[in-house]
Image (cartoon, helix red, strand yellow):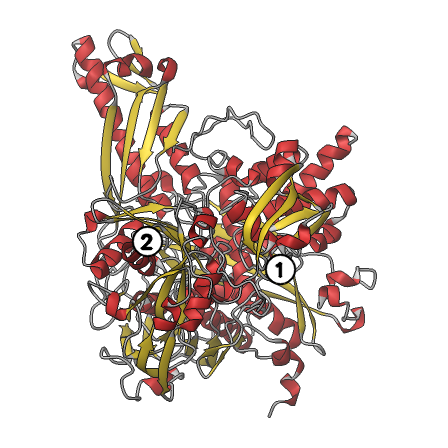
Amino acid sequence: MTSHDTTRAPGRREELEEEPTDAPAYEVASRYELHVNGAARTVEEAWLGESLLYVLRERLGLSGAKNACEQGECGSCSVLLDDVVVCACCVLAVDAVGSHVETVEGLTRRGVAADIQTALLDAGGVQCGFCTPGFVVAVYDLLRRRPDAGDLEVREALSGNLCRCTGYGRILEAVRAVQEERSRAGV
Amino acid sequence: MLASSAPTDTRPGARTRPRAGVGADAARPDGVPKVRGEFGFSSDLWMDRMLWGKTLRSPHVSARIVAVDPSPALAIPGVRAVVTAADVPGRPTYGLEVPDQPVFASDVVRYHGEPVAAVAADHPETARAAARAIEVVYEPVEPVVDAERALDAPPLHPDGNLFRHLVIRHGDLDATGEVVVEGAYEVGMQDQAFMGPESGLAVPSEDGGIDLYVATQWLHVDRDQIAASLGMPAERVRLHLAGVGGAFGGREDVSLQIHLCLLALGTGRPVKMVYSRDESFFGHVHRHPAKMWFRHHATRDGDLVKVEARIVLDGGAYLSSSNAVLSNAACFAPGPYRVPNALIDAYAVRTNNPPCGAMRGFGAVQVCYGHEAQMDKLAAALGMDPVELRLHNALERFDRLVTGQVLTGAVPVRECIRAAVAHPLPPAPTPLDPPMARPGGAGLTADHADVRRGVGVAVSVKNVAYSEGFDDYATARVRLEAGVGGEPVATVVAATAEVGQGFVTVAQQIVREELGVVDVLLAPAGTNDIGSAGSSSASRQTWMSGGAIQLACAAIRRQLIARAAASWGCREDSVEWGAGEVVHEGTGERLGLAALLADGAVEAEHEHHHRPTVPLDADGQGDAHLSVMVAAHRAVVDVDPGLGLVKVVQVTTGQDVGRALNPTQVTGQIEGGIAQGIGLAVMEEIVLDEGRVKNPSFTDYLVPTTLDMPAVAATLVEEPEPDAPYGAKGVGEPPAISSGPAVLAAIRDATGLALSRAPVRPEDIALAGHQA
């Protein structure tokens, strides 16, 4: 537990106002701003210990990034932080102040991962779908850096994204299909 | 909210593949929201004024509880409620077979991680702090963590330590063979490790009841257990399926359901709970660890004469579904072979280890490691090719299981074996291979010169659906009506849990096939307005819920034919059903669905029971199973014996699917099941130290990644099952059964080591020569 001078428990603002202030030590930020999917988003009265994943999901209504392990092992919470793929569970939200955050919702809105999303569906790469948003972000990032990546390179790049349903066969098939289609289209 | 099949969504990520009936690669109706990150999983639920729940779990494996003091937790601002065993108004226990598991431990804790209390607070971190603040005084007790020892130990529970002892006596027990092989085998504890952690949202309702939105495999059986513990009539406990992030058996048992409802009723506010990954490892049952001994007798020509086996499953602290798991382990201990004589002695035992229950393959997995190792030993003793020995003894239709049951359905064991081994072998390893592709992968540790290749084959058999006289059924209702513009729209109401397997796709395909409609809506699954669908387990939903939908559609067709006959003034048997229309056989007149529905909607509900089965008798004999599914796997591995590292290079399979209703989805089940089989063979194990879980995280419990998964080649063996809708068997479990034993066989082939334990650990290979 952190121990600072601010001693209110985290929670929603209206709840906090009812509370006494001799609570365990949580430092709460009155206000900070995140830049998410191209827009400024204000976060108020939030515990400073909250991860970027928590703030995206629970305070900003962006639940596309998932919470499968919350220790950076599974990739379900993959987002782009200043264009680099990170596990949002391992980034403090306040550390993302001043950076650009893009989530699967942002990629979807911009349409830049549409062919990846369609290929995942056509190849049968989606079952329960819990890992899927993380894979969309990871594949988007891989193919824009390394459009011609071979099988082993693709596997290595995606090895931080766990899937328990598919055994990855249909997901890797989808990546190949996107590579072929983009190469045919000269993208 | 209804999930529409109409692919009119043209936004990015939306798909445009044509709609399709049975046998086609139809698209998942939940696919588009899933790839866009918009699908609502149980952990995504949110409600105004919602609180967060957290469970306090025992740090001890076995202890007496002397005192529980929640007051330090309640003193923390933002904490709204603490509930303990004293706050359970109804039945203090729950369980799938027998309610032997406390909602909260009261007097004793019997396993590491057993729930003792739960809290609700304004913020998840406050809830975590509050759970830690609850003062519990424990008096640790020496745990019993060895299943064999538990049989003779003082009872750990009022119900005793023996869950079930099952003996199968079949044929001449004195029969002997000219060639005898014997071996002891062991399988470790595997975790389902579904990606979406246990989670749900409980909302108190105005009638004093509760609405629970939760990820589960069987809504109605959850509801009944919750209602019993809340002391509330079942109709006031309304369950709604929230998006399920995988299951694999791990969501059959109640986990947070009752805790959440108690917190919501206690605070009068919605309460959400999401397990962290470490809590998920404590929060659900695991695959039973097994210790097994086998003795196989055969003639010199390779005919199996007798199989003897002793099987001990460690059920952990509470029963869960151990009795049914044990039955499968005993019934399928000989594997998919003709065995005229058998003596199988099987025990499921209570210990202070974590509770074990359902996981994909359900008892058939553990014994497959034994019977397949034995078949390889026997082949070696006979000087026969192991594949030839299996083909020689393969079960076929109208053969008997060792339970005496005659197999009347499809049993294509030989076809599966031949299909698995017909796939081309991968190229041999060369010095030019990228080092990443060698054992050790990204560690770049293996030299080509050290790598040895091995090939192994394994075959499996398992029941589909529930067995031993269980009244197994599924309910579905279909409504057909004119939609906007007069186009017919069908709506399916069923409480079937979609857990990722693609039942929702198959449900739509069946309705399109049966009624000739394009638009098929699936109502949300819940307990409110439809009977039970049974569990999404035992590979049963395509057969059971699929069958219920098919039969409801047939009843709708009959109603439409009656409407047409009335309108034409003819007999009903003069009216024929065509694709989406009816035809007057005499006049050739036709009426389309739109015209038939002008008089209003038609609706039909069907409760689909499968053919009855019977309990096993005192000798373990009886027609206890509906039918069986078969699969064969061939694995190719590279091993660095010095480092003990294994790279699975290829797995090929032939799988008995009856008929593939959606080949792409079937392929996905096969590849995913093989991944879990490989996991158990070489990397996945919950490590226990005197009952204490040592690795409850994805850092320490390793599930296969893209770099661990080999190329998979699958052949779907389609021999229609006579009793099943469209001839389709279940497909989920078989790929997870013999894939792992095939990998073990391949590692034995590569190393020459006996390797009688799964998972194979690096030290089992690297230090094999150093052990006394």
Q: Position of residue B128 (x, y in %)?
A: 46, 65
- The mark found on residue B465 in the picture is 2
Tell me which residue sits at (77%, 73%) in the image: B450
Q: Secondary structure at mark 2?
A: loop
Closer to the camera in the image, A90 or B281: A90
**Residue B384 vertical position relative to residue A8 in the rendered view, above or below:** below
Closer to the camera in the image, B608 or A60: A60
User: From where the camera sits, is residue B591 visible?
Assistant: yes
**Residue B129 vertical position relative to residue B602 in the rendered view, above or below:** below
Screen quadrant of the N terminus of chain B = top left
Question: In which quadrant of the rendered view does residue B771 lie?
Answer: bottom right
Residue placed under numbered mark 1 in the picture = A72
Q: CA distance from mark 1 to mark 2?
A: 38 Å
Q: Position of residue B74 (x, y in %)?
A: 36, 67
Question: Is residue B311 rendered to the left or right of residue B268?
Answer: right
Closer to the camera in the image, A140 or B145: A140
Q: Amino acid at mark 1?
A: Gly
Furthest-right residue in view? B432
Tell me which residue sits at (46%, 29%) in the image: B20
**Residue B154 vertical position relative to residue B572 in the rendered view, above or below:** below
User: From where the camera sits, is residue B285 visible?
Assistant: no
Screen quadrant of the C terminus of chain B = bottom right
Question: In which quadrant of the rendered view does residue B347 lie?
Answer: bottom left
Q: Position of residue B417 (x, y in %)?
A: 51, 56
**Residue B754 vertical position relative to residue B393 in the rendered view, above or below:** below
Question: Is residue B109 rendered to the left or right of residue B37?
Answer: left
Q: Amino acid at mark 2?
A: Ala
- The mark found on residue B503 in the picture is none
Q: How crowded is the residue under tag 2: few (<14 C-alpha within 10 Å), some, or many (20+)?
A: many
